[in-house]
Amino acid sequence: MVNGQLEMEATTALVWLTLVTLATPTGDNATEAGFSYNLSTTTQGRSSSYSSYYISPTLSLVFYVITVITAVVGCLANACVLLAMLLSKNSRASNVNVFITHQNVMDFTTCAFLFVGLVLDKVDVELSEPTAWFLCYVFGTHAITTMAGNASVCGLIIITIERYLKIVHPVAYRNRYRSWMMRAGIIIPWIFGIFMSLIPIWATSRVVSGRCLKNRYYANNEIRVAWGVAKFLLLYLGPLVFLIFGYWKILAKIRRQSKQIGHGQTSGTSNGATLKEQTRKRTEMNIIKTMVLVAVSFAVCFVCMKTYSVLTRLDVVPGIGALYLLFSVFSYTNRCLNPFIYATQYEVVRRWWKAVVCRAVGRQNVVEATIPMSAAPPDTAGRQPSTSKSQVQTTKNL
């Protein structure tokens, strides 16, 4: 028993020693992480000295590979869900289906531009100045990736508003809803992403000596700190409070309606009307359950990254490259979790893929049932065996 405990302690100590060795810079073995924190400014408003943080190349490569895998999985998963949403007959049956399809488009855009940017980060070729600027601002800064990701946060708020008004205030929703509101719900997230991400990142990035430097050029340190706090409030804390409040009110309303339905059944309401109402409530509850899971995924995956970013902007904690890479992986994981939530919880996606699988299995059964009959040997008179009508009818039914 004592030997087993000593072996466990020795193994734990060895693991910790390995992690500390990987995360500790050792001379020429360290490489710059390239993070935009703790910069100091000159009177001209540019960063004259930039505090760089170093991590070992091994740990940097591990996080790079994990991020690339995350981006690839996110692209494939979002593409599958997006295919189901676009080809399903019920994809445009309601506004929320359109908004969820739009969420998949934004998550797919985030993962796609992230993957291309990561690949180009490892390309070391000499480029002309216009090409270098284009690749830096479009892919190197990950501005479009960040823009689509922040637009997705705004999209969650739009869906919450739509669900809140339709369930909590159904009369006002029916009377005041207009078709242009759905188009506005699609355009507003992209405008939000442009002003919160694209313009600020491009305004504070430069190409210097062939290197793409992101978020390093602020007018002064006060603006840098204020913008970091504003992003924390507008991109995480504010949306999180709004989502909690919205879905709390929605679930409370659904609970009250369920009690009213039960009372209506005891009062002699017709079975047909009650069944129709239960089906509608079940569909709404499925949507709410799916979106609550997406909101929880957003809260959990981004809590470390957003908190770390604002604390480093306030110089409360030192900037450590390894932590930044780890928290970045957590945040990018959110774009992979969302399509799996839709595929397993959202009824529209789940039904479409179930129908596709059933159709594929049915065709395979038809092929397997047809091949043995066509390949059957002739009888003793040299004639091919005839297929009975029951066999043909069975094949047609499949």
Image (cartoon, rainbow, N blue to C red):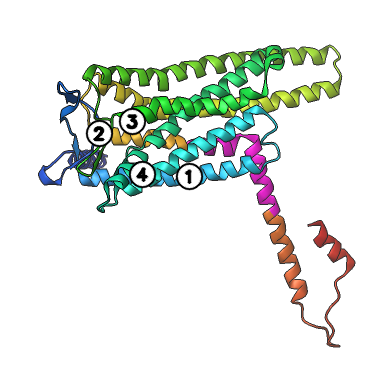
Residue 117 disc label = 4
Pointer 1 residue = 75
| Mark toward the start of the polypeptide (3 vs 1) | 1
* Crowdedness near tag 1: few (<14), some (14–19) or many (≥20) residues, C-alpha within 10 Å: many
- Please tell me whether mark 3 or mark 1 is closer to you in this view: 3
Q: Which residue is nearer to you in this view: 352 or 204? A: 204
Q: Is residue 347 magenta?
A: yes
> Which residue corresponds to the image point at 33% horizontal and 30% vertical from the top-left?
201
- Kindly identify the amino acid type of the residue bearing the numbered disc 3: Ile
The boundaries of the magenta stretch are 337-359
Q: Name the kind of residue labelled 2 in the image.
A: Phe
Q: Looking at the image, is mark 1 or mark 4 earlier in the sequence?
A: 1
Q: CA distance from mark 2 to mark 1?
A: 25 Å
Label 1: state its secondary structure: helix
Crowding near pointer 3: few (<14 within 10 Å), some, many (20+)? Answer: many
Asked if the residues shown at circle 4 and circle 3 are in contact, with their CB atoms under 8 angstroms apart, the answer is no
Choose between 83 and 19: the one closer to the eye. Answer: 83
Q: Where is the C terminus found, in terms of image quarters?
A: bottom right
Q: Please state which of the two labelled residues, at mark 3 or mark 2, is closer to the viewer.
A: 3
Label 2 with label 1: CB-CB less than 8 Å: no
Query: In this figure, what is the number of numbered marks?
Result: 4
Q: Amino acid at mark 4?
A: Gly
Which label's residue is closer to the chain start, 2 or 1? Answer: 2
Q: Is residue 246 above or below residue 332?
A: above
For label 3, the residue is 201
Amino acid, disc 1 = Cys
Q: Is residue 275 left or right of residue 179?
A: right
265 part of magenta stretch:
no
Q: Quadrant of residue 20?
A: top left
